[in-house]
Image (cartoon, rainbow, N blue to C red):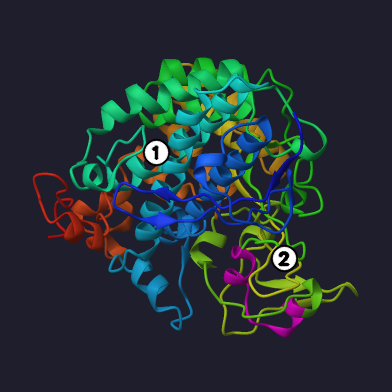
């Protein structure tokens, strides 16, 4: 397929009357040119038009993930907002604030409506690669809905463009319906239609492997362990491998390595929108600024807890990038963190040539996640011996002792620990705790109440609709 370029702005309408324009996108597979205004009436004609519209869908997904770590990690137990100058994040950490979820809702429906509009318009034309555009758009939409239902539960279920009048009447749809009618079918279509891989400028786009891996995560979330095992086994035959050197997974100069399956793509190229997490998760420390060439504000956020660092064995190769207590300079000198900070994550450190414009990707699914999900499915299916074998592949790469025969319950606890050590600060911990039905048990000491397994719907949207029979708030938040 041709290289995707963005030179449009597209107005889209969300389910709650959020109107936005298609912003510039900075994925590796996109060449950026200055945007110019084009009306919707003349937009959807050629394959190039749909390439441009697809960029807008990806952009919306990137925006949905802008604060995803605050939901997936900060809300859980392995990182905290140590610096008190970030009020919204302190409140999220203490189960008192919901800014991150509000943003996920807003940006999620912006993206979903862009996807729906593309899917409507593409039915009216005959262009090359039509099936791929459809499957790729559905994959992104399925991922967006997957995030929404995991965070909010029942949400507005929208598969076509809405008028302002209709949007006021669009209520919440049962989670099972959204999974069964959209998320799972859309991912199955992606698994059957999307290319196995891309090359050149198209690297970074959704592939068969991405669709199958995400489908496996969906099945695991739904506790459909047989289906999860089947599809995740399939992913293990697709050529993915664990990268030998764990820290190199997060090297921004080597984003699309053998373990990569699907990332949210960013670049710090001039005039591009980079990853804000680099600045957000960096200590405002001269040593760090100098080592990575960082400019702008460094936010002192997402501090790994020392109790989390202590979970690692001393020889674990993951510890000092997951919860670093200092950095080694270019001269080979180890500089300990000043006492103001407990630890920092090294997973998103990169150059920041302009404010908040980091060069690191955000990994949605990588191969180690697939292996750990497969180990979990195997164990739940009674195949505990094979589960341990798969689990040990991840342990071996980390340079720590492997496990041997043990009962299912103990293996379950091993897998749970391994996901913490392997996937920290990648947006998984909160959702893992929910899937294992352990969130309240683990997080009650940090301020969680029983109803907080779901986040509240944005209050502004509940007030806007102003009809509990259409858009009721989640229990416990009224």
Percent x, y of residue 28: 74, 47
Q: What percent of the width, then of the height, locates residue 105?
A: 36, 52
| Residue at left offset 12%, top offset 60% | 478
Quick check: marks 1 and 2 in contact, CB under 8 Å?
no
Instruction: Please report the bounds of the magenta region as a residue range.
Output: 276-289
Instruction: Give above or below for 327 relative to 217.
Output: below
Q: How many marks?
A: 2
Task: Work out whether residue 175 can be spotted.
Answer: yes
Q: Which residue is mark 1?
A: 145
Q: Residues within 10 Å of mark 1 (few under 14, many from 20)?
A: many
- Which residue lies at the image location 50% right of the left edge and 50% below the top edge? 427
Q: At x 62% / y 33%, what residue is drawn?
A: 206
- Label 1 element class: helix
Which comes before the other along the chain, label 1 or label 2?
1
Say whether residue 381 is visible. Answer: no
Residue 383 or 295: which is nearer the viewer?
295
Q: Quadrant of the N terminus?
A: top right
Query: Of tags 1 and 2, which is closer to the observer?
Result: 2
Q: From the viewer's perspective, is 94 left or right of 78? A: left
Closest to the observer, 478 or 430: 478
User: Quadrant location of residue 84?
Assistant: bottom left
Instruction: Report the residue that reaches farthest toward the front.
Output: 42
Q: Secondary structure at mark 2?
A: loop
Measured as percent of width and height from the top left, residue 259 is found at 71, 36
Counting other residues with Cα less than 10 Å from the Cα at mark 2, is it few (<14), some (14-19), or many (20 or more)? some
Tell me what residue is drawn at x 44 percent, y 38 percent: 413
Q: Does the magenta run of residues contain 468?
A: no
Image coordinates of residue 341 in percent, x first then y, are 57, 79
The picture quadrant where one finds residue 328 is bottom right
The residues bearing labels 1 and 2 have C-alpha atoms spaced at a distance of 30 Å
Q: From this viewpoint, which residue is outermost toward the right?
A: 331
Residue highlighted by disc 2: 271
């Amino acid at each position: 397929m041709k290289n995707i370029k963005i030179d449009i702005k597209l107005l889209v309408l969300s389910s709650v009357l959020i109107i936005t324009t298609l912003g510039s996108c900075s994925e590796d597979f996109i060449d950026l040119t200055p945007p110019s205004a084009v009306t919707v009436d003349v937009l959807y004609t050629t394959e190039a038009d749909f390439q441009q519209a697809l960029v807008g869908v990806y952009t919306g997904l990137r925006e949905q993930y802008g604060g995803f770590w605050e939901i997936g990690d900060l809300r859980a137990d392995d990182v905290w907002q140590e610096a008190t100058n970030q009020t919204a994040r302190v409140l999220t950490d203490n189960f008192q604030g919901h800014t991150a979820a509000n943003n996920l809702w807003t940006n999620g429906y912006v993206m979903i409506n862009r996807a729906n509009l593309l899917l409507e318009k593409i039915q009216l034309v005959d262009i090359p690669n039509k099936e791929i555009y459809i499957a790729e758009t559905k994959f992104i939409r399925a991922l967006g809905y997957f995030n929404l239902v995991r965070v909010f539960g029942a949400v507005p279920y929208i598969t076509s463009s809405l008028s302002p009048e209709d949007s006021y009447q669009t209520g919440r749809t049962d989670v099972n319906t959204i999974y069964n009618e959209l998320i799972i079918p859309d991912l199955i279509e992606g698994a059957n239609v999307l290319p196995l891989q891309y090359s050149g400028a198209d690297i970074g786009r959704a592939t068969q492997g991405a669709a199958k891996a995400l489908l496996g995560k969906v099945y695991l979330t739904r506790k459909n362990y047989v289906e999860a095992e089947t599809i995740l086994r399939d992913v293990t035959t697709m050529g993915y491998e664990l990268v030998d050197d764990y820290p190199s997974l997060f090297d921004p100069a080597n984003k699309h390595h053998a373990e990569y399956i699907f990332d949210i793509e960013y670049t710090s190229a001039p005039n591009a929108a980079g990853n804000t997490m680099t600045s957000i998760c960096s200590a405002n420390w001269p040593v760090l600024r100098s080592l990575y060439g960082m400019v702008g504000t460094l936010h002192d956020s997402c501090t790994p807890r020392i109790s989390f660092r202590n979970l690692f064995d001393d020889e674990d190769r993951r510890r000092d990038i997951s919860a670093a207590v200092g950095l080694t300079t270019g001269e080979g000198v180890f500089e300990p963190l000043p006492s103001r900070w407990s630890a920092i994550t090294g997973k998103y450190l990169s150059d920041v040539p302009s404010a908040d414009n980091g060069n690191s990707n955000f990994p949605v699914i990588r191969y180690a996640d697939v292996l750990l999900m497969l180990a979990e499915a195997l164990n739940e299916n009674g195949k505990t011996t094979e589960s341990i074998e798969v689990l040990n592949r991840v342990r071996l790469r980390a340079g720590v002792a492997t496990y041997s025969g043990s009962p299912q319950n103990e293996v379950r606890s091993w897998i749970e620990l391994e996901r913490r050590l392997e996937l920290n600060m990648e947006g998984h911990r909160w959702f893992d705790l929910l899937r294992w039905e352990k969130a309240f048990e683990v997080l009650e000491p940090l301020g969680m109440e029983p109803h907080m397994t779901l986040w509240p719907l944005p209050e502004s949207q509940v007030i806007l609709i102003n009809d509990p029979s259409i858009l009721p708030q989640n229990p416990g938040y009224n």
